[in-house]
Amino acid sequence: MNLTQHVKTLLTLAVLAVLVLVGVTWGWASLTSPFPHRAAAQGPCVTTTLQPGDRVSAPKLIVSVFNASNRVGLAESTMSQFEAQGFGAGDVGNAPQGTSVQFAQVWSTDPRDPAVRLVLSRLGRLAHVIKRTHSGPGVIVVVGTRFQKLVPGLSSVKVTTPTTICSPPAS
């Protein structure tokens, strides 16, 4: 079959038009679809309700650590130690301006909270609970100049009254 130059040009343009149409359709669909990691994004923690008899352990908790000293990197190194002991990582940063802490504190409105007691057991005998709130997720730890490292503490704490904790999101 012998096609004239005019027919060949029309066929070529038609094929190119179809290819452009397919490309535009695919591009638009890709541009308007959500990013996969955005669709699965979760907050820093999941609120978990525990009942009497349940146990709170490190993998069930998120800890946030704040530095109230002039030692650079103290909060980060303390968070690394908590993670090495199985705790979930929350926020890390500096304590609010004017905060004075010598050793370590856990900030909580309920010193008898089982999550607070578990974290406190890892901070050593000089650490104590201060009735104070902070916006970070999980159990709030504030470390000071004299804090050195975590100690072996309780492996878990039994829940005696219904309580909620900040747990790491399921991966």
Image (spheres, helix red, strand yellow):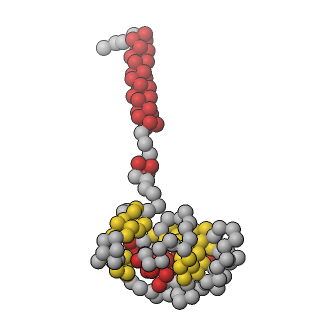
**Total number of numbered labels?**
0
The percent position of residue 153, horizontal first and vertical second, equals: 45, 86
The percent position of residue 36, horizontal first and vertical second, equals: 41, 48
Task: Please determine whether, in this image, residue 103 is positioned above or below residue 83.
Answer: below
Quarter of the image where one finds residue 107: bottom right
Which residue is found at the position 44% from the left and 34% from the top? 27
Q: Please state, as top left, top right, bottom left or bottom right, where the N terminus lies in the image.
A: top left
Task: Pick whichever, 113 or 58, lies toward us.
Answer: 113
Which residue is found at the position 34% from the left and 77% from the top? 159
Which residue is found at the position 43% from the left and 18% from the top? 13
Q: Please state, as top left, top right, bottom left or bottom right, where the C terminus lies in the image.
A: bottom left
Is residue 141 among the parts visible in the rendering?
no
159 relative position to 166: left or right: left
50 relative position to 125: left or right: left
Which residue is found at the position 41% from the left and 68% from the top? 165
The percent position of residue 112, horizontal first and vertical second, equals: 44, 78
Q: Give the farthest residue toward the left.
A: 53
Task: Pick whichever, 17 or 75, lies toward us.
Answer: 75
The percent position of residue 102, horizontal first and vertical second, equals: 65, 83
Is residue 48 among the parts visible in the rendering?
yes
12 relative position to 108: left or right: left
